[in-house]
Image: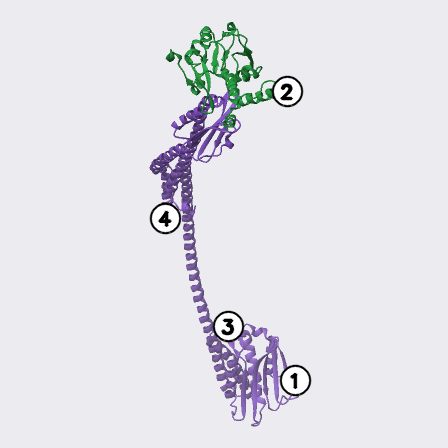
């Protein structure tokens, strides 16, 4: 059956037609032959019965008058029929009365045939008929005949049937070859159309309808489906095109927007750069102005006779110098918003050392600062605090050539930042109230610390050690 | 040996008759000490005589007219006569009863279905036959030239069998029709040859 499944529809149709014809013909032939055999048998039986009846009638007198010779003669007349193999007249008590037997026929027991009737055996038929005189049974006549003739006829029928079958199947094959096209052609056409569509994707193709039967309906349905697919394709195409248009529009809008933004950004960058330049310029100018003021103060000082006033001007000059350094550091730094205090502290202490003419062999300054970025609002006061405390240490801690070390530290401690300026000098004089000072320097330190919301204390111990703590939040933006 | 074989070959109808004969003989021997020791040959002849009825057609106007009897007239004595007389009253086919009459009066010879002349009839057979010509009477005899004398059926014994001759011309002349099946068994005799 698997082999049959792999046949093409043409082959299947042909096979179906030929097999059906063959089956029908075979059945017809077998039925015909069976019928012929049965007919031949019953015909033989009828003929034997009538022959037996005639011979029996003619044998009755022979039995009554005990003349087996005559009966034998009568029986031998049956020999004219080639089918008859033997005939026997048996008296009603079972005694054999007369016998006719062909030379080829073997003697056979006859007791079984005493009851009149028809006995069908494998290839013979035995007929037993009563012999009557009036209504009295005087004996039976038994006639046996072979079915050889019937079988011979059957063989001839078989040969004829074989030829008929052969010719019919040839005709059936020829007809099926022509007729299968009625069914297979539209189907094959449909298949070809479907294959064309699937290989080329051309949904405008249509199968042609040839008949009004189910295949015709199938082709109609197929074409309708194709139509629907085509319509959907059109709609899809439209939607697709619309979508592409939308995408195109959006893309253009976005590009425009991007261009605008890029323009804005470059403008912003330009203005930022401009701002940076301006800021640097401002810092530069402020620093220059401060230097100009410092130079003015210096000039002023050279024309003064009062030493105190002179000193005040010089101190102010130093302070200006310290503020100017902050601005200088700002315009030199890359980030105009913040500067690192560490290099500032190193720079300002080294300036103070040279400004006060410190003997570097006697007094040393150590700067120990963690990198600490601060905004300008913190940098200037903190820078001034460090400047005041350091200059105090350099001015007062080491009188009369005393040796020592000034340590400037800036460290983060917990949530606060501590600026510590310590020296191992003579120590802070007891009579001076550092928190309510009379000198301008310490007043500045206190007020600047307040400005930064910090705390200042004088650490006890040898030398002087001021600690200014301010909240780390002021550094936070710049703390890395 | 011969007799036994003959008995064995007796057909059923005849055998029934023979059996009845034997029975009646036995009964009658007891009753009236009648004849015994009738040869089988003669008893068969008697039985055959009765069977002839089945193979002969009498014309409708035959004598006697009574439809329930089969009348056999017997002329002369002999063992066959005795055997035949023993069969009197036998139920026959078609509901007939067998009637056997000894006939001595020549005038009665035409008044039966069958007239049997024994081995020793005691009459001039040829004359009697001549007298009853034209009567529908089946004539049966045992003498050698019975059929040639114009008799219709003659029984004889040959090859250990009871056989018979038939003179169809005689029966035809009497208006009787003898069945061809019977004729086939018989030896056909034409009395005209002898004349």
Front-lying residue, A380 or B99: B99
Marks 1, 3: nearer the viewer: 3
The chain that hosts pointer 1 is: A
Label 4 and label 3: CA atoms lie apart by 71 Å
Identify the residue shown where x is 55% and y is 8%.
B66
Q: Check whether the beta carbons of the residues at disc 1 and disc 3 lie within 8 A of each other.
A: no
Few, some or many residues within 10 Å of mark 2 (<14, 14–19, 20+): few
Distance in Å between CA atoms under marks 4 and 1: 104 Å
Residue matched to label 4 = A199
Pointers 1 and 2 within a single chain: no
The residue tagged with tag 1: helix, strand or loop? loop
Quarter of the image holding residue A47? top left
Rendered colour, chain A: purple
Mark 4 is surrounded, within 10 Å at the Cα level, by few (under 14), some (14 to 19) or many (20 or more) other residues, namely: few
Question: Where is mark 2, residue-wise?
Answer: B30
Specify whether residue B122 is in view: yes
- Residue B128 location in percent, x, y? 47, 8
Residue at label 1? A433
Q: Quadrant of residue A388?
A: bottom right
Secondary element type, mark 4: helix
């Amino acid at each position: 059956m698997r082999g049959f499944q792999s046949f093409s529809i043409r082959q299947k149709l042909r096979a179906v037609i030929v097999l059906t014809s063959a089956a029908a013909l075979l059945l017809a032939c077998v039925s015909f032959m069976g019928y012929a055999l049965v007919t031949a048998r019953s015909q033989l039986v009828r003929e034997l019965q009538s022959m037996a009846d005639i011979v029996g009638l003619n044998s009755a007198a022979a039995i009554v008058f005990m003349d087996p010779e005559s009966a034998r003669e009568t029986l031998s007349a049956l020999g004219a029929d080639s089918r008859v193999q033997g005939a026997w007249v048996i008296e009603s008590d079972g005694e054999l009365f007369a016998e006719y037997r062909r030379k080829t026929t073997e003697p056979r027991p006859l007791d079984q045939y005493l009851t009149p009737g028809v006995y069908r055996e494998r290839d013979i038929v035995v007929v037993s008929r009563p012999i009557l005189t009036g209504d009295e049974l005087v004996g039976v006549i038994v006639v046996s005949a072979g079915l050889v003739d019937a079988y011979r006829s059957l063989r001839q029928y078989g040969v004829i049937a074989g030829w008929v079958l052969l010719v019919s199947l040839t005709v059936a094959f020829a007809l099926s070859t022509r007729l299968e096209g009625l069914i297979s052609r539209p189907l094959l056409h449909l298949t070809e159309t479907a294959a064309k569509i699937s290989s080329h994707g051309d949904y405008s193709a249509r199968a042609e309808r040839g008949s009004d039967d189910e295949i015709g309906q199938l082709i109609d349905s197929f074409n309708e489906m194709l139509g629907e697919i085509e319509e959907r394709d059109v709609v899809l195409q439209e939607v697709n095109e619309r979508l592409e248009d939308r995408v195109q529009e959006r893309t253009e809008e976005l590009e425009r927007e991007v261009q605008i933004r890029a323009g804005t950004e470059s403008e912003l960058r330009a203005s930022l750069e401009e701002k940076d330049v301006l800021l640097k310029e401002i810092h530069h100018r402020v620093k220059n102005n401060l230097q100009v003021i410092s130079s003015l103060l210096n000039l002023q000082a050279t024309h003064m006779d009062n030493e105190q006033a002179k000193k005040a001007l010089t101190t102010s000059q130093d302070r200006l110098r310290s503020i100017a350094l902050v601005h200088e550091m700002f315009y030199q730094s890359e980030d105009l918003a913040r500067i690192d205090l560490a290099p500032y502290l190193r720079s300002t202490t080294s300036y103070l050392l040279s400004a006060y003419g410190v003997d570097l062999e006697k007094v040393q300054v150590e700067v120990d600062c963690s990198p600490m970025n601060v905004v300008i609002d913190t940098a200037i006061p903190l820078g001034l605090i460090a400047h005041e405390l350091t200059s105090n240490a350099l001015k007062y801690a080491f009188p009369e050539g005393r040796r020592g070390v000034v340590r400037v530290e800036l460290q983060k401690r917990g949530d606060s930042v501590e600026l510590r300026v310590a020296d191992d000098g003579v120590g802070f004089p007891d009579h001076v109230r550092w928190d309510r000072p009379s000198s301008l320097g310490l007043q500045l330190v206190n007020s600047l610390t307040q400005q930064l919301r910090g705390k200042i204390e004088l650490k006890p111990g040898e030398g002087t050690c001021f600690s200014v703590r301010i909240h780390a939040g002021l550094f936070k933006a710049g703390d890395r | 040996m011969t007799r036994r074989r003959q008995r064995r070959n007796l057909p059923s109808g005849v055998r029934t008759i023979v059996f009845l004969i034997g029975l009646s003989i036995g009964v009658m021997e007891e009753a009236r000490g009648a004849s015994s020791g009738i040869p089988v040959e003669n008893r068969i002849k008697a039985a055959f005589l009765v069977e002839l009825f089945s193979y002969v057609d009498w014309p409708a106007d035959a004598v006697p007219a009574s439809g329930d009897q089969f009348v056999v007239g017997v002329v002369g004595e002999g063992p066959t006569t005795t055997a035949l007389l023993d069969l009197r009253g036998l139920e026959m086919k078609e509901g007939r009863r067998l009637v056997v009459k000894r006939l001595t009066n020549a005038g009665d010879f035409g008044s039966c279905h069958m007239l049997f002349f024994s081995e020793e009839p005691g009459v001039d057979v040829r004359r009697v036959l001549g007298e009853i010509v034209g009567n529908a009477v089946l004539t049966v005899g045992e003498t050698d030239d019975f059929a040639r004398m114009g008799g219709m059926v003659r029984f004889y014994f040959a090859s250990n069998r009871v056989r018979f001759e038939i003179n169809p011309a005689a029966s035809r002349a009497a208006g009787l029709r003898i069945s061809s099946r019977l004729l086939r068994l018989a030896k056909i005799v034409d009395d005209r040859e002898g004349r």
